Image: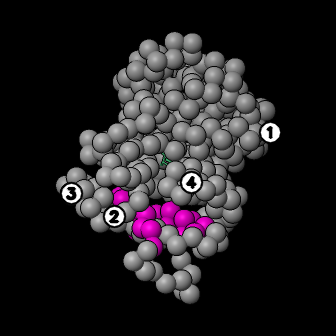
């Protein structure tokens, strides 16, 4: 937010809840865009511990906020605190954006479309085959997005195989036209799934400074595949570096972060923000 802007009783307040929340880049991204568009809005980070979630959600609504984002660890548990949930968010079982209007709260998941829009700058999902690493919140959103966009098959690969099986079982009923299979990178037989697929997507934290390394053996990546990593710090993970060396087309997760934010911005303000400008703001904030 610029130093010259003053907040008044007419300022529309938005925010993000999470625990912890101090590293969130969303306040910087949204406030910069409000400034550039000359909107009398402000976006505030709220540290909300899990035991205070329900009280906090009621409090934010009572205090007149227009909406808020939801981040770790509340994306699933917030659902029980809301009046309505969009179809996407129900399918995924997670909400990252809440709109508060006329005394009602509605939960959305903008990670899905954010990722679909970002990856489809490079490659069409329709008719493609995909290997997905992970079965957590992000992986669930990506699976739903990919299935809605018409992928032919998804091989869900996860450290805890039961979680991959559970996700696949849930989505098979909803998307019978998509071929879901599951496995783990521990089983060498699964190399063939990776070698044959058009797209490899990492939705695990493996590759972040806290969890360095490769989420899949390097030799499982074939030349000229498409590799997407949802991680955005660092901008270039070991997976992406390896893929580039194999001549693969690659993309990191910063665009997804900007796009999910832009979709939330649009839900709250009714205005379309400049996504590439939001991505540049994030790059600057991360000194990339
Ligand atoms: P999550 O719900 O905690 O799920 C984490 C997933 O990664 C689980 O499937 C977990 O496997 C797996 N995993 C964790 N540590 C692992 C390890 N050391 N080795 C192998 N697998 C491991 O987290 P999430 O919300 O899905 O987020 C996952 C990642 O997505 C984040 O780290 C973040 O980088 C990225 N993300 C990016 C954006 C974006 O906008 N770009 C948005 C959301 C998330 P188990 O089931 O075995 O525990």
**8 in the magenta segment:** no
* Mark 1 within 8 Å of ligand 1, using the beta carbon: no
Label 3, label 1: how many angstroms apart (C-alpha)? 51 Å
Q: Position of residue 23 (x, y in %)?
A: 45, 66
**24 in the magenta segment:** yes
Residue in the image at 51% along x and 26% along y: 156
In the displayed structure, 248 sits above or below 50; it is above
- Crowding near the residue tagged with mark 2, few <14, some 14–19, many ≥20 C-alpha atoms within 10 Å: some
Mark 3 lies on residue? 55
Mark toward the viewer: 3 or 4: 4
Disc 3 is placed on an element classified as: helix
Tag shown at residue 247: 1
Mark 4 lies on residue? 270
- Which numbered disc, 1 or 4, marks the residue that appears first in the sequence? 1
Q: Quadrant of the C terminus?
A: bottom right
User: In front here: 161 or 51?
Assistant: 51
Residue in the image at 49% along x and 84% along y: 6
Start and end of the magenta stretch? 11-34
Label 4, label 2: how many angstroms apart (C-alpha)? 18 Å
Mark 2 lies on residue? 64
- Which numbered disc, 2 or 1, marks the residue that appears first in the sequence? 2
């Amino acid at each position: 937010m610029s130093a010259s802007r003053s907040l008044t009783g007419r300022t529309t307040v938005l925010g993000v809840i999470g625990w912890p929340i101090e590293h969130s880049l969303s306040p910087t991204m949204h406030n910069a865009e409000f400034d550039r568009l000359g909107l009398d809005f402000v976006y505030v980070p709220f540290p909300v511990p899990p035991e205070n979630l329900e009280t906090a959600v009621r409090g934010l609504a009572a205090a007149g906020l227009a909406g808020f984002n939801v981040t770790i660890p509340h994306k699933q548990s917030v659902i029980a605190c809301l009046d309505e949930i969009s179809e996407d968010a129900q399918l995924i079982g997670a909400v990252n954006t809440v709109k508060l209007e006329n005394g009602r709260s509605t939960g959305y998941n903008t990670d899905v479309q954010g990722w679909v829009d970002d990856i489809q700058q490079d490659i069409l999902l329709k008719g493609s085959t995909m290997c997905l690493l992970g079965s957590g919140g992000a992986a669930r959103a990506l699976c739903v997005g990919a299935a809605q966009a018409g992928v032919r098959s998804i091989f869900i690969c996860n450290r805890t195989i039961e979680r991959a099986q559970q996700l696949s079982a849930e989505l098979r009923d909803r998307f019978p036209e998509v071929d879901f299979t599951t496995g783990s990178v521990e089983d060498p037989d699964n190399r063939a799934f990776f070698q044959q697929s058009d797209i490899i997507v990492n939705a695990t934290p493996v590759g972040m400074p806290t969890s360095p390394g490769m989420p899949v053996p390097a030799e499982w990546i074939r030349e000229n595949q498409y590799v997407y990593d949802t991680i955005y710090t660092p901008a270039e993970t070991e997976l992406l570096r390896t893929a580039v060396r194999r001549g693969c087309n690659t993309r990191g997760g910063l665009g997804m972060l900007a796009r999910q934010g832009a979709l939330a911005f649009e839900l709250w303000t009714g205005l379309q923000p400049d996504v590439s400008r939001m991505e540049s703001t994030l790059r600057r904030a991360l000194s990339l």
